[in-house]
Image (cartoon, grey):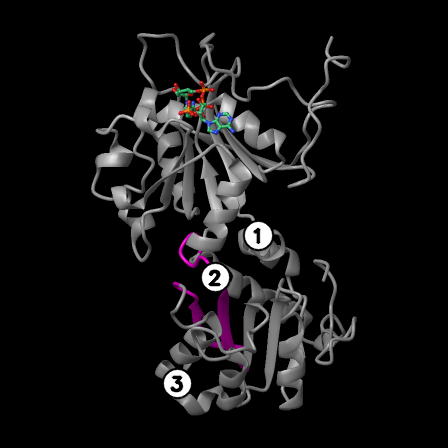
Amino acid sequence: MTGSEDHDRRGRPGGQGRQGRPGGHGEDDARWMARALAEGRRGIGRTAPNPPVGAVVVKDGVELGSGWHRRAGEPHAEREAMAAAAAAHGAAALAGATVYVTLEPCSTVGRTPACTAGLIEAGVARVVYALRDPNPAHAGAADRVLGAAGIEVAGGVLADEAAALIRPFAKVQLRGLPWVILKSAMSLDGRLTRPPGEGMWLTGPEARAEVQRLRGECDAILTSGETVRNDRPRLDLRDFQYLDGRDQPWRVILTDRPGSLPADAPLLSDGHRERTLVRGRDPEAVLRELAAERGVCCALLECGGRLAGTFMDAGLVDEVVLFLAPRITGGAVAAVGGEGFAEGLELEDPRFARFGPDVMLRARVGDCGEGKPRMNADERG
Ligand SMILES: NC(=O)c1ccc[n+]([C@@H]2O[C@H](COP(=O)([O-])OP(=O)(O)OC[C@H]3O[C@@H](n4cnc5c(N)ncnc54)[C@H](OP(=O)(O)O)[C@@H]3O)[C@@H](O)[C@H]2O)c1
């Protein structure tokens, strides 16, 4: 389904439960779905291998309850929201209510019972969801199950926003690969390091606090043997607000020479060293393993330019978060190694923010996952 496509309870395009018609639900649907999305965002970085999802229960223009999926194995968002509504107003209040949920309710029994069954049992009158299940095997199934029970169903409300919320989950579902964010801090001359003998940090404490928040979005952090040998980073979550309700992210060292890693490096010796994995040099194989065996949906790449270039060359980077420090270092390590991209690599939807003296650029890599040919010898000037 495209971001703006609508469908009615029988899955026909254009149904949309009267959305947008005079006297219809349109504006209210968008307003309540925005509330559900805000709930869903609370789950970012906590729900893998499941997606973050939010929901609200509304009746007669009043919010009865809200909820979000907190962790895999725990109740889904619509069940959380219905439980909150029932706790506040009594279970009978759910009869005739509308449930807004950011993702099509599940109709199969997994670790938790099917949400469609819970919605039917509660007696709700209407279900509005933002985005169809990205798994083609399940997409649209809720429309049929709920429709057969006489519940009005509308889909496609704020679908683009909902798609952005579950991008990492959708990538795993569709391609078996996690969403990869390359994070680098660099000087204005595009260098990742300062000259030997100077301090290690390029950016200030405000930017580093934002990196903590960013790590909180991710299920794994990838780095290189070289960076572990040189910098001995911790690559963990240190702020309780991001760690609360989740595990430390997996820390994955890509190296051909495990024996060269210092045994006293934090990744190999600290209190959560059991969350560190040492793997070989094939980035795609490592990513596929993380998705399939560790449930990783979103991976953060924090390394030097050589490994970053390898991921870029292979088309494995979906998004970049670049911190630009107001200094020129002439350091040895360029932000992205390799020979360069023919015609440059397009970044989409760039957003800038300032953290203390530093500027952050966050943008998606165009042609996500398709890769882009490096310049060959003839093209280089
Ligand atoms: N400013 C920042 O944001 C930032 C972030 C991280 C690091 N850094 C700096 O970057 C410096 C290192 O940069 P770098 O460019 O020399 O190294 P790098 O890109 O961090 O790492 C290169 C190493 O990655 C490993 N590797 C695994 N698979 C690979 C593959 N497919 N292709 C290439 N390498 C692969 C190899 O480790 P083995 O040799 O062990 O096999 C290789 O030596 C560090 O000293 C650190 O200070 C800066």
- Circle 2 crowding by C-alpha within 10 Å: few under 14, some 14–19, many from 20: many
Q: Position of residue 120 (x, y in %)?
A: 54, 88
Q: Position of residue 172 (x, y in %)?
A: 56, 53
What is the distance, in whole Å, between disc 2 and disc 3 at their CAs? Answer: 29 Å
- Segment colored magenta: 44-71
Foreground of the two, 47 or 30: 47
Which mark is nearer the camera, 2 or 1?
Answer: 1
Magenta span includes 91? no
Residue 295 visible, this angle: no
Q: Label 3, on which residue?
A: 89
Q: Is residue 142 left or right of residue 321?
A: right
Foreground of the two, 57 or 1: 1
Residue 169 visible, this angle: yes
What is the distance, in whole Å, between disc 2 and disc 1 at their CAs? Answer: 14 Å
Q: Which mark is residue 227?
A: none
Q: How many marks?
A: 3
Q: Label 1, on which residue?
A: 176
Foreground of the two, 275 or 217: 275
Q: Position of residue 267 (x, y in %)?
A: 29, 35
What is the distance, in whole Å, between disc 3 and disc 1 at their CAs? Answer: 42 Å
